[in-house]
Image (tube, rainbow, N blue to C red):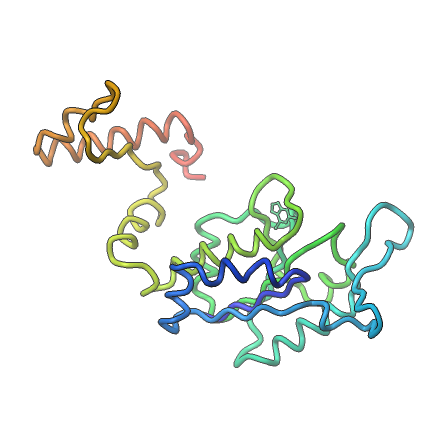
Amino acid sequence: MRFDIITLFPQIFSGYLTQSLLAKAIDKGLVEIVVHDLRDWSTDLKHHKIDDRPYGGGPGMLICVEPVVNCVEAVQQMGHAPGTVVLTTPQGDRLNQRRVEQISQLDRLILLCGRYEGFDQRVIDILKPIELSVGDYVLNGGEVAAMVVVDSAVRMIPGVLGDEQSSWDDSFSRGNRILEFPQYTRPPEFRGHIVPEVLLSGDHARIASWKTEQSLKKTQLRRSDLLNGD
Ligand code: 6GU
């Protein structure tokens, strides 16, 4: 899968892209990530400005339509297919695991990172991106949200995770929305806190039913919305 990330802050991605799981997926040729600096498409040759004051007044600056549309169109030409354009914005549809799975099945995604007060509305009217938000809170910009999209989608691409991790993901994400049971490792006692006896019993049937019960209890307590099929 190819990701193109369009941003005013390309440096933000450099540490993340060399991080182990993603670096491995790139090495294996399963994922390709190309970061583009929106400023390279500025029509202002002198100061490379890409934003301007909103018509009608109001606070902040807006990213201009021309550099964004030119940039996205140029990036689309660079690949084998134009790909799906996603704009990260707090006004978007909320990302969830179902959405992540759909995204991971695409062969090309172009992520446009929102910034400042937003984009000129014509960016959205012309490019018709899928608008995605990563939750009900405000970030300084769409870069962190774009990383959330890449990170969550990449781990769903077959071959990216080791067997152990992918079967864990399968049991806890694909249609089976339940929280994790508590886990323990050595030592059996620390400062008077002991590991539940059942886990040391060697009775696999009892252990399995304890895990299920703990997961359900925690889910009911913290995220009953998940049990109601949301
Ligand atoms: Cl995608 N962008 C910004 N700026 N804030 C957000 C967001 C995105 N998703 C949640 N909050």
Outermost residue to the right: 56
* Residue 184 locus on image (x, y percent): 24, 33
Residue 215 is left or right of residue 155, and the answer is left
Image quarter where the C terminus lies is top left
Residue at the image position 59 percent from the left and 53 percent from the top: 132
Residue plotted at (35% across, 71% down) = 28
Left or right of residue 140: residue 149: left
**Residue at the outermost top position:** 192
Outermost residue toward the front? 191
Query: Residue at horizontal 29%, vertical 52%?
Result: 165
The total of numbered circles placed on residues is 0
Q: In which quarter of the image is residue 27?
A: bottom left
Residue at image x 67%, y 63%?
128
Q: Position of residue 196 (x, y in %)?
A: 19, 25
Q: In which quarter of the image is the N terminus?
A: bottom left
Q: In this view, does 99 lie above or below 193?
A: below
Determine the image quadrant of residue 203. Answer: top left
Estimate the x, y position of residue 195 in percent, counting from the top left: 20, 26
Residue 163's place in the image compared with 82, above or below, is above
